[in-house]
Every structure is written in C-alpha cells, then in structure tokens.
Image (cartoon, helix red, strand yellow):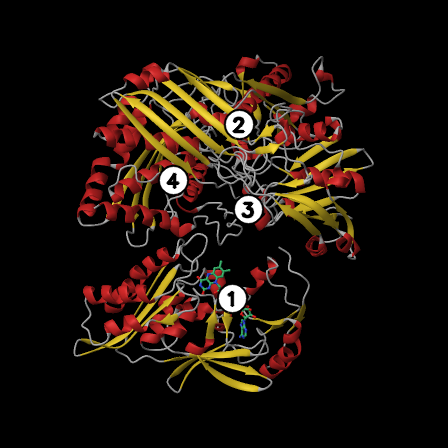
Amino acid sequence: MNAGPQRPPWIGQSVERLEDPPLVAGRGEFAGDINFPHQLHMRIVRSAHAHGRIVAIDATAARALPGVFAVWTAANVGDVPPIDFREGSIPALDPYRQPVLATGIVRYVGEPVAAVFADDPYIAEDAADLVALEIEELPPLLDVQAAPEEFSPGHPTEAALIRQGYGDVGAVFRSAPHVVALELAIGRHSGVPLETRGVIGRYDASRGILELHGAAKVPHRNQELLSRMLKIPPSAVHVYESHVGGGFGIRGEIYPEDVLVCVAARTFKRPVKWIEDRREHLIAANHSRQQVHKIRAAVDVAGTILAIDDEYFHDQGAYIRTHAMRVVHMTAGILPGPYRVPAYRAVGHFRLTNKTPAATYRAPGRYETTFVRERLVDAIAAQLGIDRIDVRRRNAITPDELPYKRPLEALGENIYMDTGDYVGLLDKQFASIDWPALKAEVNKRRAAGELIGIGVAMYLEKSGLGPTDGVRISVDTSGMVEVVTGGASLGQGFETVMAQVAADALGVDYRKCRVIHGQTDRIAFGIGAHASRATVMTASATHIAALNLRKKALDVAAELLQAAPEALDIVDGEVVRNDRAGGASISLGEIAQNLAPGKKTLGGREPGLSAEGWFKVDHQVYPYGNHIAVVRVDEETGGVAVERYFIAYDIGRAINPALVKAQIVGGYAQGLGGALSEEFIYNERGDPLAVTFADYLLPAVHETPAPEVLLREDYTTPRNPLGIKGGGESGITGVGAAIASAIDDAIGIPGAVTQLPVTPQRLKAILAQRKRQQ
Amino acid sequence: MKPAAFRYHAPKTVDEAVALLAEVAPLDGRVLAGGQSLVPTMAFRLAKPAHLVDINGVEALDRLAVTNGKLVIGACVRHATFHRPVCHGPLGQLLSEVVRHIAHYPIRNRGTFCGSLANADPASEWALVLAALDGEVVAKSVQGERVIAASEFFKGIMTTALRDDELLVKAQLPLLAPDTRCGFYEFNRRAGDFALAAALAAYRLEDGKIVEPRLALGGVESTPRRIAEAEGVLAGAEPSDKVFRAAAAAAAAAVDPLEDSVNSAEFRRDLVLAVARRALERAAA
Ligand SMILES: Cc1cc2nc3c(=O)[nH]c(=O)nc-3n(C[C@H](O)[C@H](O)[C@H](O)COP(=O)(O)OP(=O)(O)OC[C@H]3O[C@@H](n4cnc5c(N)ncnc54)[C@H](O)[C@@H]3O)c2cc1C
C-alpha cells in the first residue's frame, strides 16, 4: 500500500458546494442576466376571460407605438403546431394540446392571445396594454365533478379515463366485515420558484443554429421537442441551461413563451428575451395537485386492508401540457404506498376545466395520494377503534416481502419496490424522538385545554427515473477534470454531488472537477433533473465513466512507469505505486499530455484522457419515509401553528448528507404551503384570485419551524452501483397527510380534515360544526 | 411588472412640494413617500400616476417630536423608527409593540407612518392607532393648512378626507396618561401580512374600575374605528374575563364586516370575538 495517509472518500461527506462562490459573490447568471446585442423584449397579452370566443384582436394602437417591432396573434404563427407532449404524439390526447397563441377560443385567464415585441420591456408592456381583445364570454367549466362538456367538436372535457388495479375488488367489498369510505380533496397549488421563468431565443444566422437560453430541468428533451415542433434538425437547435433559481417540476417544461421566443428570433433574426413577471407566473406556469378522491377500503375486524377502491377526479385545467397523463396516471399507480393491498381498483377521470393547465410539481401524485391514503388509514383506525400506528404496522409491507412487485404502473413502468423496512424506520424514528414522551407531553397539554395534536404519515417515494444516462469525463493537460452530463441543475447541488462521485473514482480532489450540465451542444443525450433522478441516474453514470477513465489512465501510466496497472493507484491526481512508498509517479495532467494526438505514447488508443460511461436501469428505486407533525389549533381563529415536525427518510446512500437534508427541508416548507395556505382559488366566473404573493400564501420563516430530520442509510438499493435512492421530493410527500392527521388529533375529531389546504376559514367551519353537534 | 411612464419630481421644501402638487394633482400626480404600497401598485399597473412628487428629500418632514402633549410624526418618519419606544410612557411602548406587526423589516425601513394613513388600507395598524387614540393629521396645500380628526379622516377602503393636492405633513397622537393600559392583538395568516382582524384596547383603572375605555378594530370594516358598544360594556366595570368577553361580543355584534372571496363576513365577525378579547387581556396583563 501507498505509505501516505488514505483520504476518506468524498462520497458521504457534507462538503461545501462548488456552486456557491459565484452565487454568493453575485456572479451567477440567471435568465434575467442573459442579454444579447439587438435583442427584442417580448410581452404576452393574456386572456382576461376564463372561457370565450375571440371575436377580434385590434393591435393597431400597439403597433403604432414607437419602439414596437411587431405584434403577433395566432394568425402569425399558423404554421406552428400546438405544444407537443414530451414523448411525442398521443392521438387521443392531441386535440387537447395548447396552441402557442389562443386560436379562436380562450380557455383560461392568463392564456396567451398575442405577443408584443419591442425595444425594451417597458415599451412592450405599454404596447400590450394597448392591444384590444374583444372576447365573447362563454360559460366556464370550473367544477371537476360536474358533468363533462364539449372541449371541441367530438372531444369531451373528460379526456381520458384512467384505470389501474388488480384482484376482484367487488367481491372483496361484498364480503368485507368493514367498509371505510371517504371523500377527500387536494387544493390547487404549485411550485413557485423565486426566479420566475425566463427564456431568450437567438438565431445564429452565421451557423444556422437556433438557440434557446434560460432552459431548465430537461434541456435535451426540450431540444428534441422544439426540433419536432419547428421542423428543424435537432443538431440545429441548441438549448442552454444557466443558473436556475428553483424549478420544482414546473419550470423548464416547454410553454408557449419558449416556442414564441424561438420562432420570433428565427423570423426577426434578432434575439428575443422574455422574463415572466410574478402575476404571470401564478396564472400561466403549470398549476398542480387539484384532485377529488372518493375512496373506500374494505377491512377485516383487525384493521387489515383487504381492498381499496378509489374513484378520483383530476382537475387538469384548460389544456394538456407536455406531461400528458403523467400525474393522473401515476396517481393510480402509487396510491397504495407502503401497504399491502390484496385487491385494488382506481378509476381516474382526467378532466379539463377553465383554469390554468396543470402538470407535475415536486412529488406529483405522491403528495396527493399520501394525503388520501393516510387519511384512509387514520379513518380505518378511528372507525374500528384501533390505534392508528397499529393499523400501519399491520398493513405495512415487511422486509421479507421485498422485493415486492405490484401490478401497477408509475411513469411507464411496473412498480417494483426494492429494499427497505418501513416499520423499522418508523421504530427508529420513534426512538430518536422519544415517541412515548412526546405523546405524554401532548396529552398533558391537551388535558389542560390546549388543542394540540400529533399526526403521522408513512409514504413510499419513487426516484431515479431511467431509462439511461451517459456521462463523458475528460482530464485536461493541467489535471483539471471535466464531467459532461446530460443532467440539469435547479440549484440542488448537482455539480457538487457529481464532482464527489467522480473524485472518488478518479482519486482527485472534488474541487478539481468541473461539472457541465444542461448544454445540448456539449453532449448529445440527457434526461435532465426531475423525478428525483439526478443523483441516482447521473451519479451512477458519472461513477461508471470515471472508472472507465481511471482504467485508461492506469493503463497509460503502467506503460510509462513500467509497472503493472494493478500495482498503481491514483492519489490526489497523481498515479503512484500502491505497493511501496516513494518512487516514480505521474500526474493525470501529464498522462493527458501523453495522450495528445500525435504523441508516441498514444499508440493505438483514442486521443485524450477521456472516457464515457453509460448507466441503464429497468426499474426506479423506491425509498420511503415518515412524517410526524405536532400542531396547535387556535379554536377561536382557526389558525394552525406547527410546533414541531419530524421527518425520517432512508435514502440508501447519501452522497452529501447536508445537501440531502437541504432538499428535505425545502420540500417540507413547500409541503406546509399546500397543507395550510397555498391555494389557487377561482371565483365563479373563473377569475383567478391568487395572483400575487399577497393572496398566494407561501409559508415564510415564522410559519415554518425547522424540521428535525432523521436521515438513514440502512437499505441501499442493488439497482445502481452506489446503492443510491433519490431524495429530491421526500420532504414534501408526507406533509399534507401529517398535518391533516395532527389537526384531527388536536381538535379530537377523527376524519375532520377532508380538504387541503386547511385554511382558518375551513377549520372554523369544522369547529363550528362540532359545536353544533355537541 | 414594469410601471407605466411617469414624471418624477423631487422638491426640497414643503412649499415646493405643495406647489408641485397643486400643479400636477389635476394631471393625476401623486405623492411618493416610502413607496411600499404605491410602487407595487404601479408595478402591477393598478396605478398609473402621470407624475410622482417624491417627498423623501423634503427637509424637516422626517421630524418626530413631542409638542404640547402630542407626539408629532412627520411625513417621512419610517415605520422602523418605532421599533424602540419614541417617547416615555405607554404610547411609546404601544407603538413599539404595534410596529412589529407591520410587514417585514425591509419594508418597515422604508414605509412611513403617514404614508400608511394616506394609503388607508382598512387593516393598517397605524390607521387603527390613529382611530383608537383619536389622533389627527395635518394636511397642507397651497390654500393653507387644516387639521383633520381621525374620525373625519378615514372615509372608506383606501379613501381619506385628503384632497389630491394636499400633502399630509404630519400626524399627531395624544400622549397617554402614565397609568393607561394598552393591548394590541391581530390575526393574520402569516406574520407580516395585513391583518384579517386587529384590535387595540386602552383604558385606565380608577378604584379598580375601567375608565376612559377605548376599543377599536382594524381590518374588519372598511375603516378602523372605535366601537362605542364595546366601550360601553367596559366603562365602569371591573376587568374580568366575563367583562372582556361581553365587550368582545358587543363589538362583534356592532360591526359590519368586510367580505371578500376568501373571508366571509361571518368569519371576520367571529375573529372580532378573539382579537377584541385578546387585546383587552393584553391590556390587563
Ligand atoms: C409585503 C408588504 C406587506 C405589508 N404589510 C403591511 C401591514 O401588515 N400593515 C400595514 O399597515 N402596512 C403594510 N404594508 C404597507 C406598508 O406599511 C406601506 O409602507 C404603507 O402602507 C404606505 O406607506 P409608504 O410610506 O410606503 O407610502 P407610499 O407607498 O409611498 O404611498 C402610499 C399612498 O399614500 C400616498 N401618500 C403617502 N404619503 C403621503 C403624504 N405624506 N401625503 C399625501 N399622500 C401620501 C401616496 O400618494 C400613495 O397613494 C405592507 C407592504 C408590503 C409591500
């Protein structure tokens, strides 16, 4: 062995983020910071009506305003198709796609109707105010449970009926000793990144390349989609990710504005910049979550679940966007969560309404179904008079049942839970928080008259969406490592994590690794950052690529040092003998020099010290966790104060525990919003009422006590080389469920909470009803 | 979120300011104080004033003094000034308690006491203070100066007795007797938001009985005001949970609550029960 002290691996250390120096020094580059000479600024004229027929659009005054370059309506983009689904055409759903500018009909307040292009953003907004829209109002459809209407001739507003299930549910219900039934609603809310959307289209006429700057999340997917829609070869479209101030699933999809800046840049031969404002963001970017579930469980006398039957209504809003049926379909697949459900039926109504279109938001389908399922489990406990923890213990899948195949689907693959111990994690959490003491304290305060309660939720996550990821790593002649990925960073520490993984395999300092992501001109393939996939997929590919590079480096070094490759190791970027101290060594930079084209040492090898690595999976991985909330209810005002919050999560392997915890804490804060305060409400005319941060209530620091996180690495997964499970969504998944359960407990009414968010008004109504019944 | 074009004026003296206002008020000119309400409204283009008369550089408007038994608050005195008591006795204490409920720190560093009055949001804490304590404002225009009592000043949601060409130069609050007990309570959905209901209570005790009771509500009706029915319950009574509940019930019965798409009138009326009683409890504590 080499005599020098062995450095502990980078993986597993909470090292400082590589991303931070430019960000804290104000040298970041977000979409708003990107400017090109001669650029135009785009402003969108949006529908003020939820539903109506466009009678006339008069842009004469707007066009006449000095500084205005052009005003477009649907007529100017007649050759641009509606926005495609990410995975391509789905004939049954194609009629519901959104045109880039409203064509004939407007279907939600906020829908783009015209686009103004001007020399500066002020003039663009002045001109947008001058565009006169004449719209003949049509009755809006706002209630997802109301009878479907016609979306367009021959196409009902129920775009699809989703069915997933197995077993003879009807027979089980007919013979079951107990049936527990609930109707539950999740409010419409969404991810609200502090950086609103922003895109800059640029046509490089010198090279014939269309560029989209300000991309996020899925740059390569968007390159494909734009290429398909605009009928230009993929190699002539390049998409560039810059710094991204939060994505949460909603940012980085292709929206009308992204297409418009591209088409306009190509048409005008001038760069076109669009920065979304906050009001626009709240009415134009994807909403999410709104569902109503009518769910029943058949149970035996001991509280064992025999079957679950769920009929749900998914409020999609006005169009079907890039995700197509992803959320509504996954809802059915993921609902059973960590429990054994012998027979199961889910029927989902995928319905359009006259609201902002919906799609994925952090933990799509899981936030909703965890609320629904955990409400159901609490209700089983209440109805049968069994302890709610006992019901969970009884029904949770045990380690010896894993891996567990469930004949349901999520994201196009069968659910196949890998490793874990769901009840075991709950016990570890109970031990870490001293559960009996917590219960005793809460009981004491309740006995003294306080409305205080504890809520519990268990959940199953899914992460690491495949199918594949590739990474190319090269070392330059100075020894600096470049890791080129098709991944993306939304601010989560992607670069640091990839650097840690590459550094361990290569034997270099992680600070020597520069990680490139989200640049379609640097690597041909990539699936980006979503579905808690980045660390599982891209880090696995990075690991493999780094090992390939290591092999090549050692192979060359062996020749140069006249040693067997097995006798060599890489320490701090130097190839050294691992069998004795001292002696000759060679740096990775020198090896790179020796591999330059034309060098004698090159021999028959490919030039350059570089390698690729590909990682493929058949199945996602299924991490899991529990949330426990302690809340206090103010009986007189209906206010809810979260006093303590506990999250336990098994991530398999944490590359950087501090970053994982940061993801969990951030998700939790967003989860609280959906549980207590954030809601896109509409009046009966379909006007959105939450259009500023004064009405759309994000929880702030006062409302968000720091959660206590128990991060475990007990069950790695065999499905990737490092045993990683994802964690990007785990902090949010259980919040709605745990808060609802805690409020029930605080007010002493099992099943009281049937709707999120639990606003003071709604809670007062529940309490008033209790008073009347007393 | 880009405001429409406007012309910007930066007068140096009050006379210049009112002269400018006389000129631009008919052309939709407005005073710019801390900008914490006006600027967001302009960014949303809900307001498109053609002229802004910025009073931040006007000399002497940042003055804060106690004169003739009154706390005199100049037009450019910022919310943050009140973080620490600005005068001895219960008034300074009360203001330092109330100010913590106004928005957030950066906003308090910029927003002004008088701007809040001129803006007249029904839930403005300072407007509630002015109404509860029967303060007054001094308005000035080229035609001269006039003093307007709180009860005459607030006319409705975001409307006051100020004329467009008038500058609110200062607000005046009476100092409170040293044995005055004050309590403030507000309910909102997030710290720093405008209150859904707020109450300010003040009274003195003589022989264990409540005298000079004041109970005012903000955020409940279109303007903040004292609620005589509740004060009637308190006057002469000994402070007790029962009395406070009765006063709160009288207040709840007396108000005509605002209603919006989220908050029903009944919900607000219900909140009055809580905020009025809690303000009284705090006064008694
Ligand atoms: C996020 C947020 C939260 C907030 N929360 C609260 C809260 O909880 N409670 C609260 O009370 N306020 C709140 N505010 C408002 C804040 O207190 C403002 O500072 C205040 O309402 C207006 O004061 P200003 O000096 O900023 O006035 P400006 O915004 O400059 O002006 C407001 C209006 O008053 C007029 N005006 C101002 N000064 C004068 C004058 N001297 N003479 C004549 N007209 C004048 C202006 O022309 C304008 O119409 C909040 C603001 C924000 C942005």
Neighbour tally class for label 4: few under 14, some 14-19, many 20 plus, Cα within 10 Å: many
Neighbour tally class for label 1: few under 14, some 14-19, many 20 plus, Cα within 10 Å: some
Nearer the N terminus, badge 3 or badge 4?
3
A552 with respect to A164 (left or right): right
Q: CA distance from mark 2 to mark 3?
A: 22 Å
Q: CA distance from mark 1 to mark 3?
A: 27 Å
Residue A331 or residue B68, whichever sits in front? A331
Which residue type does callout 3 highlight?
A: Leu
Q: Which residue is mark 3?
A: A282
Q: Which residue is mark 1?
A: B110
The correct choice, above or below, for A499 with respect to B248 in the image is above
Q: Is residue A711 visible?
A: no
The correct choice, above or below, for A520 with respect to A684 in the image is above
Q: Chain of mark 4?
A: A
Q: Position of residue A399 (x, y in %)?
A: 33, 18
Asked if the residue at tag 4 contacts the one at tag 3, i.e. Cβ–Cβ closer than 8 Å, the answer is: no
The correct choice, above or below, for B65 with respect to A618 in the image is below
Q: CA distance from mark 2 to mark 1?
A: 47 Å
Q: Nearer the viewer, mark 3 or mark 4?
A: 4
Asked if the residue at tag 2 contacts the one at tag 4, i.e. Cβ–Cβ closer than 8 Å, the answer is: no
Q: Which residue is mark 4?
A: A755
Q: Which mark is residue A326?
A: 2
